[in-house]
Image (cartoon, grey):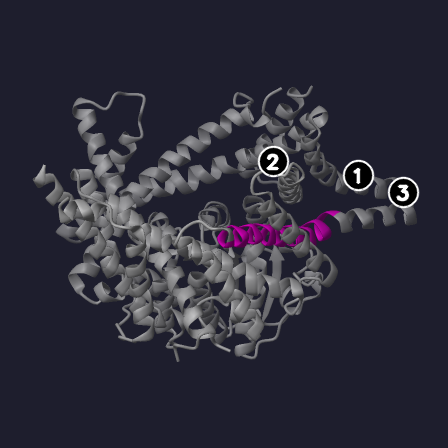
Amino acid sequence: MSIWEKAKTIDRRIIFLFMFLGVALPLLIRIGLPVSVTNDVKKVYDYIEGLEPGSIVLVSYDHDTGTLPEMLPMSDAILRHLFRNNIKVIGMALRAEGTGIGRQNIRRSGAEFGKIEGEDFVFLGFRPEITAAILGLGTSFERVFPKDDEGIPIRELPMMKDINNYGDIEMVISITDDDTPVYWVNYANARFKVKVVAGLTAVMATTFFPFIDSGQMVGMVAGLKGAAEYEKLIEKRGRAGRGMDAQSIAHLVMIGFIIIGNIAFIMRKRGK
Amino acid sequence: MRRSFPILVCFGFGTIMLAQFFIPSKLSTGAYNEITNWVQIIYAFALIVGVVGLIRYHLSRVSRRQGGWFFNLVTVSSLFMMAFLGFVWGRGDHSPFMWVFNNMMAPMQATVFSLLAFFVASAAYRGFVARNIEAFLLLFSAVMIMFGIASIGNSIPPFSDIANWILMNPSMTARRGIFIGVGLGTIAVSLRVILGVERTYLGKE
Amino acid sequence: MDSGLICVSLFTSEGVGIWIASILTLAIYSFLYRDNPIYRFSESLLIGISVGFLLVTTFDTTLLPKAFEPVGKGIIGISESGGINSFAIFVWILIPVVLGFLMFTRFVPRYAWMSRVALALYIGFGAGASIPANMQSYILRQIDATIRPFLNIDSFWSLVNALIVLVGLISTLFYFFFSKEQKGAFGKITRLGTFYLMIFFGATFGYTVMARISLLIGRLTFLMKDWLGLIS
């Protein structure tokens, strides 16, 4: 059996080991690769930067815990930007698990900037059925969320007194690990003209370029790399930025495997 | 009655939702508000139906001592434990319910998803070969994106430019084609559903 | 405490929590060696906890404020005023709740057909709402965005890119036209469509790799930083 034939039957655990080292070593030994900001992330930053202090932004936690390592640095960075610019935040979730994540995340970020719950930010909780919830918010927030996540009627929350529907907010930011922003675009943007931004797991990124190109979405922050770019823009290096060395090296390991796999394929073909 | 009434309900509510978009009025907006509210309530009940179905499935395996029944018992026990914690002590930030969420559920879920990093590497090594033009394009695009969007390649202009060009031109337009296809397909199926031609959602008699 | 990339210890700094999270993380990773009872135990535990979380959250945040509390208030309203209006309001509130409960008839074969009514309402709603949304968002705006660049051509390369996008869109759409055999000139266009689709799938694969590695970075950072303290 030639070396190329052996390469075909290599134990997958050897590949696993290389992948582990490709991620673990750069975490231990920092290289400090630069992070350059892409256009789609810059658009989001610029739009938020242009908002007046006191504007209202809806942040929807539309993801599960499975993708938290990607989503949390992203929502942290975006919330820091919003609170730093004194923008008020309405939090909600279209995934049950998003309730647990969003409530803790928004409170922690709010506390970092001395914001008061009920006045500077609120967390409304979880609503099932994405389409009905998004359409319902178009006419009445109170109808969709009679009470917030703590069971307080939303009319008793000072921040929510003058907020009735999408007309009273500046934009929707959907932090998601699936295609929920498609629903925000299809139902909230198309019908109520509300601006939509997506904070996405990288898996979903390619789905949203047509929406950015058509102007249906302001921009997007995709994956841990997008979060690192956002951290760079707000000049607060956080968890995403620290992971970028490992991300690059692991990509190189993956490309290396693909190249070796192709060389082995060509050599085996020649040998026959 | 068992089939015709649901078809009538589907037709009625489908028509109202369609009509209210084109004929905005106080009446249609009122109907729209009620229906969106009803759907959220019904959907929440449907989620509970799903939970009950899961419990029934696992309990039946435990009661019949089927292979791996111990793991079914673990699932049901942990489900009831979580429900007990939530209903008794609530969902507050410092509740036992959220402690389990933060220290057990979140790390396990994230770890399961991260397993894919290893399997993707193994699959790419074995199956990602340029056998023909289509496979070459797939491979070229994947490698360019992997290299061009990571920090290491993003700093080298030709690679970042190529990656961005792929994303905003050929890749974007293919996705747009899929969107248009999905849009046309959804409209056709929706019309069939509203008009009662498509009835598979009713199941068997 | 600013810890790793995963929230587990972002929201709590208790040592016991970090140990439990770490042990469960390693239990899941044991699958990389091979399938084993420890992995299956963790997997079963995860399913149970996740569904339990869904049950409590759905009941507490949706069913209670939107279904049961309004019904309770309706009953109080009738008992206090007793008027026909209160009764009518109560019936109106009760409709979605009754429809919701009808979903449970799926477990009783004899009455399972009743759940179709609630299902039909839901399907009808989705179908009716999706037609204008899809037409606007998926079709009209996408066609508009494909044609509009031709009105703003400012360089040779912008023309080339606009043509690449237009040709790509047409050929991809042709590829999905399965009513005609993909041969001859038509076959050539559909083949071009597959080239575009392959580029799209490749790009998606590249991003998928990026996402999965990000998750691995998160877990390893948690293990090496929060648990073992290897990273400063």
Discs 2 and 1 share one subunit: yes
Query: Please, is residue A229 above or below residue C143 in the view?
Result: below
A226 displayed left or right of A193: left
Q: Nearer the viewer, residue C125 or A50?
A: C125
Query: Where does label 3 land, which residue?
Result: C83
Disc on res. C122:
2
Q: Which residues are magenta?
A: C38-67
B159 displayed left or right of A220: left
Q: Is residue B106 visible?
A: yes
Determine the CA span between mark 2 and mark 1.
20 Å
Q: In the image, which is nearer the foreground, mark 2 or mark 1?
A: 2
Q: Amino acid at mark 3?
A: Gly
Determine the CA span between mark 3 and mark 1.
13 Å
Q: Nearer the viewer, residue A79 or A192?
A: A79
Q: Are marks 3 and 2 in contact (CB under 8 Å)?
A: no
Query: Where does label 1 land, which residue?
Result: C91
Say which residue appears at 72% left-offset and 52% top-offset: C64
Q: Are marks 3 and 1 in contact (CB under 8 Å)?
A: no
Say which residue appears at 43% left-offset and 58% top-offset: C29
Q: Earlier in the sequence, mark 2 or mark 1?
A: 1
Q: In the image, which is nearer the foreground, mark 3 or mark 1?
A: 1
Q: Earlier in the sequence, mark 3 or mark 2?
A: 3
Determine the CA span between mark 3 and mark 2.
32 Å
Query: Please, is residue B111 above or below residue B135 in the view?
Result: below
Badge 3 marks a residue whose secondary structure is loop
Discs 3 and 2 share one subunit: yes
Farthest residue, direction front: A1
Q: Amino acid at mark 2?
A: Tyr
In the image, residue B156 lies at what x, y percent?
18, 65
